Image (spheres, rainbow, N blue to C red):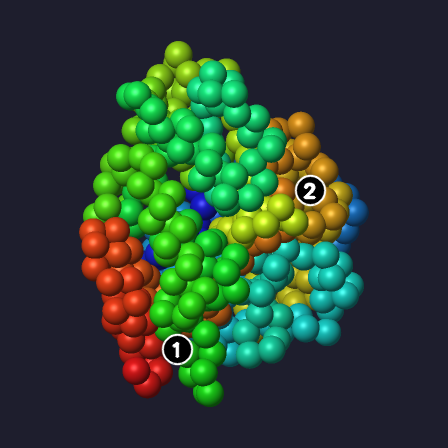
Amino acid sequence: MKYRSLALLSTLVLGSGLVACSSSGGAGDGRTALDVWLMRDSVSAQFQKEFETGFEKAHPGIDVKIQIQEWEGIGEKVTAALASNDAPDVIEVGNTQVAQYAQSGGLTDFSDRVAELGGGDWLEGLAKPGSYDGKQYGIPYYAANRVVIHRTDLFEKAGIDPARIRTRDQWIAATRKLNTGGTQGIYLPGQNWYVLSGFVWDEGGDLAVKSGGGWKGGLDSPGALRAMDFYRRLQALGKGPKDSDEARPPQAEVMAKGQVAQIVAVPGGAKVIEEKNPELKGKLGFFPVPGKTADGPGAVFTGGSDLVVPAVAAHQEEAFTLIRELTGDAWQKKLAVAMSYVPNKTTLAGAVADDPGTAAMAAGAVNGHATPNTPQWAAVEAKNPIKEYMTAVLTGEDAASAAAEASRTITETLGGDS
């Protein structure tokens, strides 16, 4: 399963063949042919077939044509589709990508239909980035976020009950206890900025904030500095590298070597660990990232997808009907169980109660956030001064000075005044 908003879509593709991918005409028998683009690993073949059959039975005048798209190069392909006269009727996009598509005016505004879709219960980490300039363009589809994957045997040996780790201070105390002998209490690489972001949000800060008519970097705020200090203390309770992220080397593979008690990752990382080290099967558990207080779980970055409708789509009402069904309670519950996703509404978390990893995700998702909702944020991730800032602090540089420098770079990249 790929968590599309956890990585930048940056590979260029040619726009040729786009017309062949979309066909918004009639089905030839008086039915409306509705073209839908869903992304690779968004649905299984079985779920896709079940949905198509169920939807067409409920709506006999619509013929659903789902085409599975690849994530590589999809940004350019969607941009080309929105500018064409032959766009698909419904497109799945990464939740943090909605703003860049909406900025051009290429998406249909669903602001007046949010209530009809049950928007009051949507996960904020999907709904907020699905809006732009006060209007709702993206309809929350499904979510995923990080949890703490831990060695249950090591926790038991240390006399630690993960269910009692409710606060960050308790997490530090437990991790310090686990960090003994040849065991790392936690493997936390120095540049895992998604994890840092959660701590920043817990402290009431953000990576960037609106300032006047633009955006200003926020890493130098008091809250963000407190978050970085907590990250520094947690990271020190293991041997994670200070100058690389969770992909270099892959942290699940590091944990599979048997000397790590915890990592912060999406639950799918447990499968990688077990594949690399079958001796760890049955010895992995999950709990939400702890919060600053025991009132609730810690803030997490929400990855996932929204559904959008191109403004030029030929079948606007039929497209809305499909979105209403696919994001409605009945199909959301089925999708969550089938794909181990977090449903799009806080009220549906119980649907994944029998899946420990997904249940931990759903518990954390109630405090989910997204990156700053500006079309220019992708450019910040491309430069990623946040990573450089984290390494600077972890290697001894003054946090306030390093944060101020990183914030200036974010401000300049977002087009603000430094």
Residue 32, given in percent of the width and then of the height, sits at 67, 58
Q: Which residue is mark 1?
A: 216
Residue 51 image offset from top left, x and y in percent:
67, 41
- Hey, what amino acid is under mark 2? Ala
Image point 71% across, 61% down: which residue?
A: 119
Can residue 277 be seen? yes
Image-quadrant location for residue 307: bottom right
Q: Residue 84: where, in percent of width, then height? A: 45, 71
Q: Position of residue 364 (x, y in %)?
A: 58, 45
Residue that badge 2 annotates: 349
Q: CA distance from mark 1 to mark 2?
A: 35 Å
Tag 1's secondary structure?
strand
Residue at image coords 21%, 54%: 396
Q: Quadrant of the C terminus?
A: bottom left
Position above or below: 342 against 95: above
Judge from the rendering whether residue 71 lies leftward or rightward of residue 405; answer left or right: right
Say which element carries label 2: helix
**Can you tell which mark lies on residue 342?**
none
Q: Amino acid at mark 1?
A: Lys
